[in-house]
Image (cartoon, grey):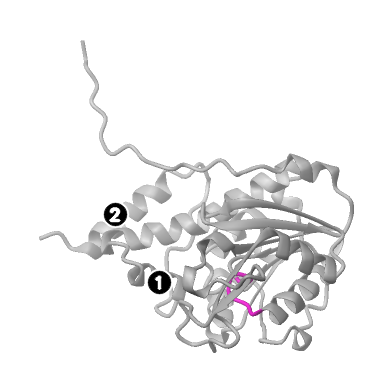
Amino acid sequence: MTDPAAAGARVEEAYLAQLDRDWRPVREIHPEDEMYLWTEEIGVPPASRRVQYMISGYEILLLLEHLASCLGRELSACTPLLDFACGYGRSTRFLVHEVGAGRMLCSDILGGAVDWLTATLGVPAMLSAPDPADVDFGREFELIWVGSLFSHLPRERFKSWLAKLYGALASDGVLVFSTHGAGLCPADAEDPSGFSFVRRSESRTLSLDEYGATYVTPAVVRAIADEVGVARLRGLAREVWGVQDGYVAARAELPELERWNLTPRVLGGIFRADVDAE
């Protein structure tokens, strides 16, 4: 009988080997990485869990490279970069190779994740907090990436974290974040306001009062952005992982942002090819 772990490692290695890069990401996954543990909870087959985890991390690198290109920039020049709410480095392990450990800062609310990121990936990392008023980044950033945090926050935290992170941008910087679109909300939990917060999440450690499941319409995201003084906001439906809506907030007027479109994604794979030699 095939060992699922061994089969999964082979699939993962094959996937990483075909990436068009001159580097390989760290393959170690922390045993408490909730993004990896979540793959089991949603029914991903054992042999596919590691590669699914790696794919989701690599797609963020592709997304940010594509956005930078649309803005006429190179991702490697969008520094310093803040990888916020980064967990145990699902996307960090890819970003660090293109950005450089010394030109980025990682932050998460889990102390174990912060320690692991520095020890394993060599990136500076700082502990976050539930209340943004208790966090001081001590610098401004050209690019801030926030993966799947705003898809978990109650409205007041959503608003205050958007204000905090937007305020940490350099004058020509951009904040990139994702949300669950309202269409993903279970019918029995839908709030007519367009902002629905459900006390349910994949986290095994965070309070459901602070970290649940949030579903929000683009109109409400824009209204909250207006409340906190976001000068420019552009959104794309299901841009992140093909599921979550993606948003870019900018301090300056960036006409190039209108060129931002969906990141090209590989939606399938070739499992067999037969060639007729004649």
Question: How far is disc 2 from disc 1 in space, using C-alphas?
Answer: 21 Å
User: Mark 2 or mark 1: which is in front?
Assistant: 1
Q: Which residues are magenta?
A: 149-154
Per the image, the residue denoted by label 1 is 38
Q: Residue furthest front?
A: 192
Quick one: quadrant of the N terminus? bottom left
Q: What residue is shown at x 28% (from left), y 39% (from top)?
A: 271
Instruction: Say if mark 2 contacts mark 1, CB within 8 Å.
Output: no
Would you say residue 262 is visible in this rendering?
A: yes
Q: Residue 84 bears which disc, if any?
A: none
Q: Nearer the viewer, residue 22 or 181?
A: 181
Q: Residue 106: horizontal and vertical position, in percent?
A: 65, 72
Q: What residue is shown at x 89% (from left), y 51% (from top)?
A: 253
Count neighbours of disc 2 (C-alpha within 10 A) and say few if under 14, some if 14 to 19, many if 20 or more. some
Q: Secondary structure at mark 1?
A: helix
Q: Amino acid at mark 2?
A: Arg
Count neighbours of disc 1 (C-alpha within 10 A) and say few if under 14, some if 14 to 19, many if 20 or more. some
Per the image, the residue denoted by label 2 is 10
Q: Secondary structure at mark 2?
A: helix
Q: What residue is shown at x 71% (from left), y 43% (from top)?
A: 260
- Above/below status of 140 relative to 125: above
State which quadrant residue 250 falls in.
Answer: bottom right
Q: Nearer the viewer, residue 242 or 277?
A: 242
| Mark with earlier residue (2, 1) | 2
